[in-house]
Image (cartoon, grey):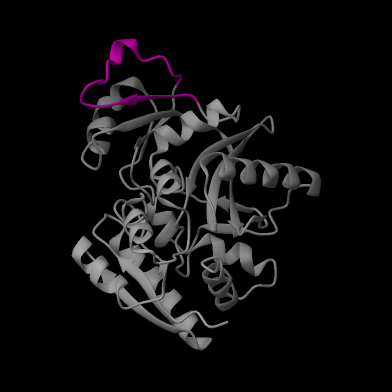
């Protein structure tokens, strides 16, 4: 298929910049190996993006985090009429916002851990805090577990919130779910096989994702087929409720009573050698090159 000239947009200016550069390089090489006229472009400003867009026929978005994954780039490409991979502006903006993603899931009757949020207008009031410990504290608009801490008792909470506020003015304090952690990739309406994540860390943090060689990724995930199919259906529903399209990944927990809990949705997951979507795709017989090509095909029509 003739895609014309393809810009692989990577880098950006968010905290996940280095991860994005790694993803973008891998995607660019995979497309070039298949004869696609693809060029990696490190995008750090709106002027860069507009200038780049004028020279290409479509874009593969490998930007992670704020500005590249939160709907800003998507809105500009929409306005310029350049086809691109991944979700549109609205779904990207919602999914990047963990708090509003959870509100939408709750509105659709989907299960997600209990939470409160803290902002400049709604500061933490320790005496009124009612979620049982432990909890997980997260910046609402960051990815790759940046700024996150597990908190085991009330005396630790204010410090964890202050740390998260170094990355975002809005912070989510979420019920801790004890159980097994899974991730479900979606590709063009298909739920790929689930992956179970096992780490020796307290949770699946930045080091566990990108640095540790001890993190275990189990696929096939070992669940009964009926249970896995039920969770895959939940993943697709969670994806559709947000209005996501093309490809992405939904993270969830399965507690000790086998109750699933939706955690978050990634509209531009990582595409590095530690990344999860390529692992799930491999379980369906897709090579990394085929996966990248299939994602690019979603920009057609």
Q: Vertically, is 281 above or below 202?
A: below
119 is within the stretch colored magenta? yes
Q: Vertically, is 69 above or below 171?
A: below
Q: Nearer the viewer, residue 102 or 254?
A: 102
- Tell me where residue 8 sits by quadrant: bottom left
Residue 199 position in % (x across, y down): 51, 51
Q: Residue at x 40, y 65 (%)?
A: 62
- Tell me where residue 39 sits by quadrant: bottom left
Which quadrant holds the N terminus?
bottom right
| Residue 176 visible to an observer of this rendering | no
Q: Vertically, is 20 above or below 98?
A: below
| Residue 34 visible to an observer of this rendering | yes
Left/right of residue 159 with respect to residue 24 in the rendered view:
left
Residue 177 position in % (x across, y down): 53, 32
| Magenta stretch secondary structure, dominant | loop
251 is within the stretch colored magenta? no
Q: Residue at x 37, y 56 (%)?
A: 74
Q: Residue at x 26, y 55 (%)?
A: 14
Q: Residue at x 46, y 66 (%)?
A: 271
Left/right of residue 222 with respect to residue 43 in the rendered view:
right
Residue 133 position in % (x across, y down): 44, 23
Q: Which residues are magenta?
A: 114-132
Q: Nearer the viewer, residue 175 or 79?
A: 79
Residue lying farthest to the top in this orientation:
127
Residue 276 position in % (x across, y down): 53, 60
Q: Vertically, is 66 above or below 119?
A: below
Across the whole image, how many numbered discs are drawn on residues? 0
Which quadrant holds the C terminus?
bottom right
Left/right of residue 266 with respect to residue 68 in the rendered view:
right
Q: Nearer the viewer, residue 258 or 107?
A: 107
């Amino acid at each position: 298929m003739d895609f014309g000239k393809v810009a692989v947009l990577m880098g950006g200016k968010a905290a996940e910049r280095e991860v994005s550069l790694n993803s973008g390089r891998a995607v660019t090489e995979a497309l070039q190996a298949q004869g696609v006229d693809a060029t990696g472009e490190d995008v750090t400003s709106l002027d860069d993006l507009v200038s780049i867009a004028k020279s290409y026929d479509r874009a593969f978005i490998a930007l992670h985090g704020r500005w590249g994954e939160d709907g800003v780039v998507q809105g500009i490409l929409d306005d310029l009429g350049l086809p691109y991979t991944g979700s549109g502006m609205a779904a990207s903006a919602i999914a990047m916002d963990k708090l509003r993603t959870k509100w939408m899931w709750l509105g659709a009757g989907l299960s997600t851990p209990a939470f409160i949020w803290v902002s400049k207008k709604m500061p933490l009031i320790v005496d009124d805090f009612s979620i049982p410990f432990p909890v997980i504290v997260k910046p609402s608009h960051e990815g790759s577990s940046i700024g996150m801490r597990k908190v085991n008792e009330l005396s630790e909470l204010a410090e964890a919130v202050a740390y998260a506020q170094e990355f975002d003015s809005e912070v989510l304090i979420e019920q801790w779910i004890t159980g097994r952690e899974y991730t479900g990739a979606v590709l063009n309406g298909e739920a790929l096989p689930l992956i179970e994540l096992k780490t020796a860390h307290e949770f699946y943090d930045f080091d566990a994702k990108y640095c540790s060689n001890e993190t275990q990724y189990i696929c096939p995930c070992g669940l009964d087929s009926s249970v896995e199919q039920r969770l895959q259906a939940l993943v697709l529903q969670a994806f559709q409720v947000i209005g996501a399209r093309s490809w992405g990944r939904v993270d969830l927990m399965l507690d000790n009573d086998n109750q699933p809990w939706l955690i978050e949705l990634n509209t531009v997951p990582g595409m590095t050698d530690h990344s999860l979507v390529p692992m799930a795709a491999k379980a369906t017989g897709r090579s990394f090159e085929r996966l990248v090509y299939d994602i690019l095909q979603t920009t057609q029509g």
